[in-house]
Image (tube, helix red, strand yellow):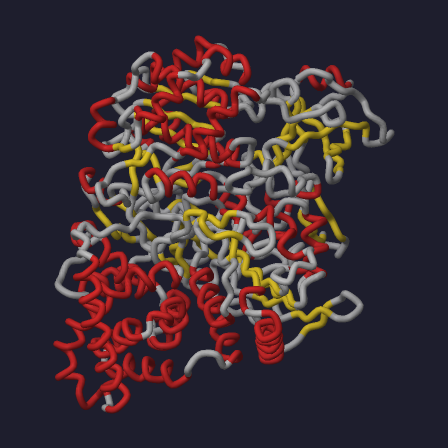
Amino acid sequence: MAQDSDQAGPSVGDWKKSACILCECNCGLEIQTDGRRFAKIRGDKAHPSSAGYTCEKPLRLDFYQNGRRLETPLRRTPDGGYEEIGWDVAVAEIAAKLLKVREEHGGDKIFFYGGGGQGAHSNGAYLKSLMSVLGARYYSNALGQEKSGEMWVDGKISGGHTKGDFEHSEVIVFVGKNPWQSHSFPRTRPTLKAIAADPGRSIIVIDPRRTETAELADFHLQVRPGSDAWCLAAMLGVLVQEDLVDRVFLDQHAVEVEPVLAALADIPVAGFAEECGVDEQLIRAATRRFAAAKTAATYEDLGVQQSPNSTLCSYLNKLLWVLTGNFGKPGAMYLHSSLAPIAGGGSNASSRKKPSPAKRAAQKLVVRSAALAAEAVARAVPFAARSRLARPLAARLSRLGLATVVPAFGPKAGIGPSGGGGARRTPVTGARIIAGLVPCNSIVEEIRTDHPDRFRAMWVDSSNPAHSLVDSAGFREAMRELDLSVVVDVAFTETARHADYVLPANSQFEKWDVSFFNVEFPRNAAQVRPPVLSPLPGTRPESQIYAEVIRATGLVDRALVERLKRAEQDDHDVFRMAFFATLAAKPALAALVPYLLYEALGPGMPDGAAHVAFLWGAAHLCAFANPDGVRRAGFAGTGLEPGEKLFAALLSRPSGVVFTDDRWEDVWRYVRRRDRRFTVHIPELLAELDGLRGQKAVFTSEEFPFTLSAGERRSFTANTIIRNPDWRRRDGDGALRMSPQDAERLGVASGSLVRVVAERGSAEAMVEVSDMMQAGHMSLPNGLGLDTVDEGGNAVRRGVALNELTSVGRRDAFAGTPWHKNVPIRIEKAEAGGPVGILSEI
């Protein structure tokens, strides 16, 4: 049950500020410790976004912190086992082997995956620095199997990440989203309850399941599995054919509208309604309610993003709010600022008028010249002797240098807006790279081949792709074909079990850290969390691990690092000049920014906060890109003062900081087109829309007649960082949910043991008969099937490891995202091994 917890805690220790790391909300927490145990956890009322709210999941985070941890580096032995080695040995050997791959095959053959868990995003910045040093080009993380299709569409339409002001919306549409369980916006459950209780507001749910959110909804469009595109297209057909679009808004704020309206005017609404299995009049009523609302917003999630036609669904979903003018006002959709966005993340955008190409070129020339001169001075004269004279020059040159290098060093350093519209392709399969992410379904194919450009080495950071990505068996085989594999993690994960080296990291509560799911508007907030506990002996923060490996490669000029360190030790103003002058003179160093800041600023940061040293650069980028919003948030001043003040506030306010305080009229600054308009015509996707006419929304077969949603969010499921199954109070084995109709036809009941058989593999599961499911549709929860050890040292696996069932080939044609929510299966009796029933029609 969701809680606004304010009960008094035991007297075992002081309450320490932190945050939940189990979903993107990252709600603020207060934790009371008893030795190394988390004795009590409650919501932090001072947190600027969650304001004391938390669901039930973080209250059991002690199972993460005190699970089975790695405490020493491990090296794989020839017999497939592991031996403990020292840190110096591990770093030296790994660096040497990375250099060997680089020299023999090229740095671009080293593939990087991960870069931080749900609530620990600092790692990714340092990972990007190591990539830069080695000349690596290819990278991915969990977003590459979830959000890349939506990122691609957002990039085409607006250029940035869109979100809804759900708290104030009159109508909300949830597409493949059950926020009652998966949350994703502040104070989710109180917000849903408030909307459901208000007769003047409505919830519309498009989902095959009768979810907890659908139970609250005024309109549940219960589509057949995989038919969401037909339903969304039918809604858009109603909008255009009944003239419910906001033409004034479109005239003022959109371009290339007519081809889209013409295509939607030709949608066969009745036929598409029949194809998706939803009554036509219900679709029309829901659409009219959405169009009539003064404010409306939509939210799509993995239910459609990991299903057939996922990128097309993202496009159609966004057309709903664009065509009705639901943008840029309270209760509608928005784009937002970002402190340091993850791939495809926020939408930092300066309100300043962009200079002409000629003026920009002249400015660059001036800055480069000044930077070269400053660098020469920095080399020749001791900083202390000239610091007083240097200050005026430092302020001017630093500001000018920052303005020049922002476009280069932000994205490359991993601390600015991420680009990538899909123009780049992977080296072997030619898969589209969106927001810099290799599609996760393509990773195995980029390794298991004799192609000369195949990946030869892989570095995995705080992620478990051998369990969480499609086709686990194929991924394990691919790892064995690599020349080198390194895993950095807190636990001996399924991926670590197949790596050449495993490096133990601090937990997310044993170091300073920050999360970058900062997506709110008009007040956007971030929380830098100090450690709750001292590090477990033998473990290290990832920043230190990356720094030591970078040093061991010998590929970074140590003289440069020492100059920056001496500058900071002598005078911070002069450090700023030296830092930005160096970047202006040598833009190729941009991706090294996190590492350079760790080396230069880290040693002098308070209370061991070196792990977040890179935020100094992020704070300056944010202040430069959003001067008015940062000033209104309380960080005013001239030159680089706002960035310095913001950085100081992030370190000193453990409950979190509002870093931009925008106005609703500011939202248009975040639209990337020069004329601040939406581009609504995406020809490739209009062609896909037209192709729906000739398709049937059937993705099963006679051999595999049921559809499995692999990865349902439930009350006691979360990401796999909690490896101890005892944390789940209910449904510990993760039951297979099926409809009463299917249970009757198959001759099974709740508690029956069955075998789930898919194209790639099979697994046993216990049945739960549930009215949530429609006939032909079944579900298994996410986050289970992990290899664990019980108190007696015996190997235990509870629940189904879903990616033993999934297939690489079932993926979106544009983004490569897997169809985890649409896996064709059959059901067999586990004890007999024979089919217990087949439905010929679903």
As drawn, is 323 to the left or to the right of 388? right
Which sits in the foreground, 571 or 680? 680
**Residue 527 appears at what percent x and percent y?**
35, 54
Residue extending furthest right? 832
At a point 67% along the width and 40% down the height, the residue shown is 807
Find residue 566 and report its image quarter.
bottom left
Any part of residue 90 in sight: no
Find residue 704 and report its image quarter.
top right
As drawn, is 215 to the left or to the right of 340? right
At a point 49% along the width and 57% down the height, the residue shown is 116
**Residue 484 appears at what percent x and percent y?**
65, 67
Q: Is residue 40 above or below residue 827?
A: below
As drawn, is 508 to the left or to the right of 792? left
Which sits in the foreground, 719 or 813? 813
**Residue 631 appears at what percent x and percent y?**
17, 54
Residue extending furthest top? 281
Which sits in the foreground, 75 or 291? 291
Q: Is residue 116 above or below residue 683?
A: below
Q: Is residue 109 above or below residue 177?
A: below
Number of numbered discs visible in the structure rendering: 0
Find residue 573 and report its image quarter.
bottom left
**Residue 834 appears at what percent x and percent y?**
85, 27
Any part of residue 536 in sight: yes
Position of the C terminus by quadrant? top right
At a point 24% along the width and 55% down the height, the residue shown is 625
